[in-house]
Amino acid sequence: MTNKKKPDPSLKGKKPANRAAAGQKKKITRNPSHITNKLKRSEVYGKYLIEKKARKKEKRLKLEREAEALGEEVEKKTPRTLDNTREKEATRVASHDAEVEADHADDEFAPYFSNEKAPKIIVTTRPRPSQKVFHFIADLQNLIPSLYFYPRKHYSIKEICTFGANRGYTHLIVLGERHKQCNGLTISHLGGKGPTAFFKVSNVVTSQNLPNHGTCTNHVPELNLHGFSTRLGHRVGRFFGSLFPHMAQFEGRQVVTFHNQRDYIFVRHHRYIFHEGKKVTEKDEQGKTRARLQELGPRFTLKLRWLQDGTFDTQFGEYEWYHKRK
């Protein structure tokens, strides 16, 4: 009877370890979409993206070194973004266009920008609103000075427009709601002049849900309108501008921003804070002063759906512009 050779106990049930490749990192060059395990796939995909970025940077630096060795100038390429690759709007106008400035001097918003008239605004909701929308209304009252809330009850928007115009109010804001989330905002300029605009509302974050948010004061904020460069943009930007008094109280250091980008209007409310830094050298009388922003809230996004001439009238009103579905 022959004796069988027993395997080494260290190799029992295992394959011999490859000690040479143990200290080497395996490069991931293939997209790990073939891995069926979700957790493993996400882990490997993260490493794949890091290595891909490192390879791209290494290639760019190599080309720059080769160009410098040959005495050539290194051309820095600008990254392609949605903004710099957009087709130019035919209705885009210059910032100081004489024709546009003449239109601004005669439009229905001119008295607000020249401080001849102060805005006074009603805000209301849909019938039977949820409790969540009242937190948003409270933030809007901190955002916009001279904003007064009236419950909707059973009144129609036309009746509220007549009520507000008879009592000296200049604007009406109506908040729409769906699934206990604000999803629509109608602004109407009262007094029969118009216009009326409807915006879809998204990404609403009230001040109580903002991390490290500040507390608003009663100072009139500064207004920053950015990105309203087309004919329609000038019209909408001045509509927003008519909601605010144009006598900013700079000691409050509060800024309301309407930033238009790719036809979405991002609304933010900040306070800017100055910090005196340390002295760099002995000759410096004082250190460098640095500024930072503190968000006050609310935070939300608007998208224009239609703009109507005159006060609110969806049945017989004439539309200046409305969004066409593609």
Image: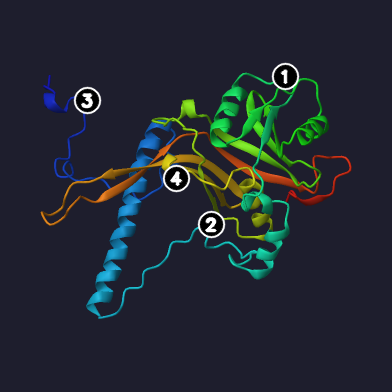
Q: Amino acid at mark 3?
A: Gly
Locate the N terminus and report the quarter of the image it occupies.
top left
Query: From where the camera sits, is residue 15 visible?
Result: yes
Is residue 206 shown above or below 243? above
What residue is rendered at 59% in x and 67% in y? 96
Q: Amino acid at mark 4?
A: Phe
Q: Which mark is residue 250?
A: 4
Circle nearer the N terminus (1, 2): 2
Residue highlighted by disc 1? 128
Mark 4 and mark 3: Cα distance apart in space? 77 Å
Circle nearer the N terminus (1, 4): 1
Mark 2 and mark 4: Cα distance apart in space? 35 Å
SS at mark 2? loop
Residue toward you, 133 or 262: 133
Residue highlighted by disc 3? 13
Is residue 78 shown above or below 264? below
Circle nearer the N terminus (3, 1): 3
Q: Which mark is residue 82?
A: 2
Between disc 4 and disc 3, the foreground one is 4
What residue is rendered at 12% in x and 23% in y? 9
Q: Position of residue 106 (x, y in %)?
A: 72, 59
Q: Are marks 1 and 2 in contact (CB under 8 Å)?
A: no
